[in-house]
Each structure stands twice: as structure tokens, then as C-alpha cells.
Amino acid sequence: MSFATRAGLRLLRYAGPGARTRPLARVVRRSLPSRAASTAASNDVALLSSTLVAELKSLSAIHVYYPKLVSALQSTPTTSSSPPPPTLTRDQLLQVLDVLATSGRPTDLQRIEEILTHMPTVFGIPVTIDIHTVIIRGLIQHATDHTVYRWLHSMPSRLVPFTPTLEQFHMFLEACEQRSHFKYVRQVVCTMRETGCKPTNETFKYLIRSRWALAIQEEKVPSLSDFTSMLDDMKLEDLPYDPSIDELLYNSYVEQNAQQYAKKIREAYRYRFPDLQKDHFSEWKDEIIGVAQSKGVEKAIDHYFQVMVPKGCDPVPQLFRAILRHSTTLDDVRLVQKKFNLPPSVDQYSVLIMNNVRAGLLDNALSIYEESKTIGIVPDAGLVHPIIKAFCRSPTDENLDKALAIYRDLAAVAPPYSKTKESLNEHAPGPDSTIYNTLLRGIAASEDLDKYFPIAKELMDDMNDFNIATDKKNASSIIVLFMRRAKSLPDALDAYYGLRSTLDEQGYAVVLNAFCQLSFNNELPVPSLSSYFEIVKDMRRAGLEITVEVYTILLKQLGSIPARYRSRITYDHVVELVTTVRRVHDFLTLDAAVSPDEQVWNQLMDTYQRLGCFGDAYRVWNTMYIAGQFDHISVSIIFDACGYAGARNFAKKVFSQLSRDRFSLNRHNWNTWVECLCRLNQLDEALRTACQDMGKNENTVPPDVETARILIKFARRNRVEADVLEWLQQFLPELWKTLPEDLRAGERNNEQQCTNN
């Protein structure tokens, strides 16, 4: 470390960092709040609350005063004699969320997340499903469709989990109908089930209207197959006949003077849905689901007996599944069994397992599965598939062995299932196509393919024995299995050509990801761009939508090669990789079929910085910043890039921009910034940041063990470890207590080792 840096450390210890900042001793000093201090804090809260309430529609005021208000509330002591001062009401917080969501910039989305965290802990207001409705309604106005889509799909796995409602999805679909491509609208509808929200006839009306909007734009009358495929999806969803769907399909063709098509589509619809009577149970089911979701299972059961029984609603299995649609506990199942005098059934346990897996509670799901085995429930595909799927998402040997064991439990009690499902609500008594697809996909991603390839072949033999055909779901996994076993690029492509006709968008993504990682004759796995984009062309020829995922898959692989093959990579390899990435960048910017989002820009920026191309990485960041299309991941990447490139001025500029915009760095951002400063030989500035900036106001987070680990690592390199350890112990005593012994011991351990040696 330079003399200036050593001197800086001493100044930090004894005199503070200078006129610009407070002395460190003053920063860490703590005192108990006096009555006067308590009164002053309450006055601060009241003033900040009234100021914010007066400017609830001002975006800038929200970003300035809301974090100050939260900070004041968190530091205000409350006792029985001094109740908490008045603050924001639920309606006022909803108005704040609406303003932020309507703006929809990265900083606004970040503030929304903070408010959702603060509502129960700071304001004492529970987060409810209607709060998400306010957020989604606002996001629809200005945020990208991908942002709204991600929000809906994140709801089941949030700290307070919710299943998105039909109202929320329909709001989104109504907006998409006017501004999004039909294929995107179809993707939204087809993936609704993943969140636990099942599409209805009303949902499919948005899809039908979206297809006609595209037809009018293209000035073409759509073919019957465009709609018959939708009808097949509706049949799989077990939807009833709906006269309004009948009329919409028929009249849309009539308005285009295509009477013959109108007649045929009506015939096709009525053929698939021959029962032309109105289905009252469908309405009752939606009603009981809504009550159970908003008020709980016990209230839903009361509602059934008090309101629905007089209307003639019978207690059938579909009703019990509807009551348990959002349940995760065995207590709810036992309550249903008791109130309706029901024996335990596989349906009841399947619902619980699915809901727990969807909420990320795999241990709970396994416990419920074991309980079902204990009481003699015979498993079916619907019961075990969610658990098998969860294990196969992370295909370690341990997880794959567990998934295969559960598969064998199922196979042992029922034969495989070769009958085509008539409904997605129908579960096979034994292993079905979906089970095999999940297992094959997990094995295809295994690091130990030598161990599991024979098992995969056994699974494929099982499929053949029981007449389960290769379809679009399992074709990609089979292609990947044989690609990874191929000895040459032509052999790998042959495996792809043999089954490519069955692939859909998701299957192509799986194949492209595997293709990028192929390596032959011990060469580095640099994918052939000509072959890669030839596969992409096959997607276009098949009429499939090309998304940014095509580019993120390729860029991620290219960026990972230097670190994974550090000992083998040469200068010529790096030149080849940089040239390849720049070509991909050109393809991306010229591809009119895709709209780049934060994800692909982040991947491009990260790939450039991993290849040492700081200028390219910074230009990508600048493009993102100007467009307001960046997130926390973007910030960490550009800090990393500046640190490794030694770009001190650019680092300071980025930090200043974010500070000016009041963008709140998360913990990972702060630690990346501290590391960036250390790499720029600014250890004294990094220390000052950790002590005086982090955790000292409402927009920051306190330093943690990782912060200290970074500082100590760079201090050791500069031979000032003892100084930094002493400084951390003196000025960050609470953090010091949490440090592992190996960090606190520091040079003492090193000196002891040297002595022993």
C-alpha cells in the first residue's frame, strides 16, 4: 500500500476522513434516546408524513420523503405512554404504490419492493392480494409487458405468497390484446397454470381477439387451424361450452365475409363442446375459490353450506379441490375431511403438494408425500410430479436419485399411462409422458451423464413398452442426451435433425443451450455461430417466436469460457471470443424480431467485461442507463467492470449518476462497489464507505461479513491487514462480533503458520 493510503488509514482512525465527512468515532457513537429525543423523533415523523401526504402524486417527493419517513419511524421509540405518531394510512400507501407503478422505472420498482417489505413491519398493514392489483394496474400503463409478466409469475414465491387472480391476468391480457403480438399473448395464457391461476373461457376470449387483431393488421383472414388449436387448449383446460365464445368465433369470420369459415369454426367448437347447456358448477367453483383465497378454508366451507347448497350445488370432488386450491397445510385438508365426512384421497394431497412446491416449500411437500404413503394413499402422476420436477430442476446426483426413487414408487403401484389426456385436470394413475419428460430433462442436465445415460435409456424403453410417444415436451431432452454423447459436430446435429420437427419454443431453448456447451476433441466449447443460427432459422421456419433468450443463452456461454478454462485459454482464444461476441451484438441490434430487455443487455455487458472489453461493456451500460432499462444486476456488473479495468473515473461517474437519481443500492451492489474501490487502489475510500456510508441513512444497508471479507482480502495484499482489523474492531464493533475467527485472527494466524514452518 502506498504511503498516502497508510496515512489515510491513520487519519481515519484519529481525525476522521476530512472536512467532507464526519469523524468515524462520531459515526459509531450510540446513546439511549431521551424523552426529548423521543418527542423530536415523533415530530419528525409527523412532519415527514404530512409533507409526503401533501405531495402523494409527486414521484420525486415520494423518492425523497418516503425513505426518510421510514428511517424516522424505525428510530422512534414507542411505549404505552407514548404511542406511535400518526403516519401513512393504507389508502395513502396504495396511492404511493400506484404512482410508482405507473412510472415503472427501475428506481420505482425498487421502491415498490421496499414498501411491500415495510407495510407489515413498519406501518402494521398486511400485504393483501388487492395491493398487487394496484401495482399491476399501474405497471400496465408504462412498464414493459415482460415486467408485468414477471411480476405476476413472482407472486407465488414472494415473502407473502399469493396466487395471481383472474382479474389481474385479465387486466394484463386486455392491455396485451391492444399492443402485444399474438404469440406473446398466447404464451401468457399458456403459462398461467404455472402460477396456480387457471384460464377460463373469458381468458380465451382475449386470445381469440388478439389473433383477429393480428389478422386485421396483416390484412389476412386467419386459418381455421389458428383457432382449432385454441379450442384444443380449452378442451385440455376442461372448460365448459360458452355461447359467447361460439358467437365470437362465428361473428368474427362473418364480419370478414368468410361465411364458410364461420360455419366450420362453429362446427369445430360444438364438436369439441357438445353440451350446449350453461354450466352452473363452473360459476360456483370460481365463487368458492374466491372465498377460500380471500377468507380461508373454514369461511369457504361455511359459504358453501349457507349460500351454495340452497342453489343446488352438490358436494363433488371438484368442489373439494376448489376449496383447497390455495391451501398448503394438512390442517386444511383435515378440516375439509371433517366437515364433509370424507376419507383421505389422492386429490386432496396432490393439491397440497403442488401448492407447497409452487411456494418453494419442498421439505413441506415431501412431508405431505410421506404422510400420504403412511395413511395408504395410492400415488398417481399428479401427486408425485411436482416433487419430481422440483428435484430435477437442480439435477445433482442426490436429487436425481430421489426423483428416480419417487418415480419407482409410482411405477410399482400402477402401470404407465398411454392414454391421451382429455384434460389438464386429469391425472394418470401411473407414469405418464410428463413424468418421463421431467426425468429425462433432469438427466440430460446431469454432470454425471455416464452414470445416468443407461438409466435414461431404460426410461425411453419404458416409454416404448407402454406406447408413450415422443412429443414436443420430451423431444428436447432426448436430443440433448444424444448430443452430449456425440463424438463430433455432425453427429450432434444429426441427433437434432432427427427430432427437430417436434420442438416448440421451450424445446428449442433447451437444445440451443446444450449446443452451446458441446466440445469435441478436447477443444474449448466455442459454439459455431453458423450452426447455432441455422437452428434459430429452423425456429423461424417452424413459425415459432424468436425471443431474447436466443441471445442470452449464447452470450452466457461465451462469457463463461475464460473462467472455466483459465488454464487452457490463450490470447488467440480471447481474440476469437471477442470477435464472436461482437458479431452476436450486431445480430442482436439488427434483429427486428426481438426487443432487447434488461436481461439480454445485462448478459451482453457481463460477457464483454469478462472478456476484458471494458469500452464495449461501458457503452452497453450507457445505453441502458439513458433508456432507464437497468436493474440491480446491471449496477453490480458495471461496478465489477470498472474495478477490473482500473477505470476509476468511470466508476465515480456511474456512482454519482446513481446517487443523483436516488437509486438505492442493494447489499450486493454495495459490496461490489467496495470491491471496485479496492481494485482501484482506493482502500481508504472503501473503508470510509463501509463505515460512514453503508447503513447510515435510509437509502443504504449496513456492512456485513462479506464487506469485511473484501476489505481484509485487499488489506492483506497491501500488507496493512493488522491496521484494517484494528479499524474494523474499533469502528464497526457489532460487525466485528459476527466475523468468523479466521477473519478476526488475520495476520496472527499467518505469523503462527510461518513460525511453525
Image (spheres, rainbow, N blue to C red):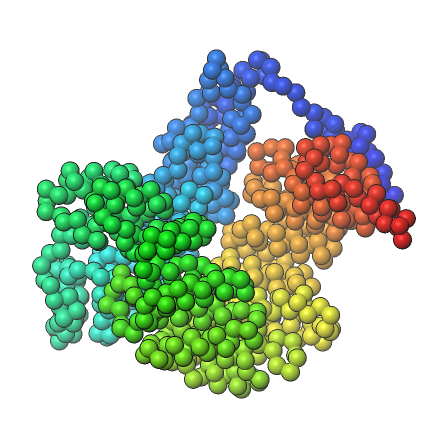
Figure disc tally: 0
On screen, residue 692 versus residue 535, left or right, reads: right
Q: Position of residue 411 (x, y in %)?
A: 37, 68
On screen, residue 662 versus residue 264, left or right, reads: right
Q: Dividing the picture into quarters, in which one does residue 354 lie?
A: bottom left
On screen, residue 441 versus residue 251, left or right, reads: right
Nearer to me, 424 or 559: 424
Q: Position of residue 394 (x, y in %)?
A: 51, 61
Q: Residue at x 11, y 56 (%)?
A: 278
Q: Position of residue 396 (x, y in %)?
A: 54, 63
- Note whether residue 736 is visible: yes
Q: Residue at x 49, y 70 (%)?
A: 443
Q: Residue at x 40, y 70 (%)?
A: 437
Q: In the image, is residue 525 above or below residue 67?
A: below
Q: In the image, is residue 106 above or below residue 246?
A: above
Q: Dividing the picture into quarters, in which one does residue 57 lie?
A: top left
Q: Residue at x 67, y 65 (%)?
A: 563
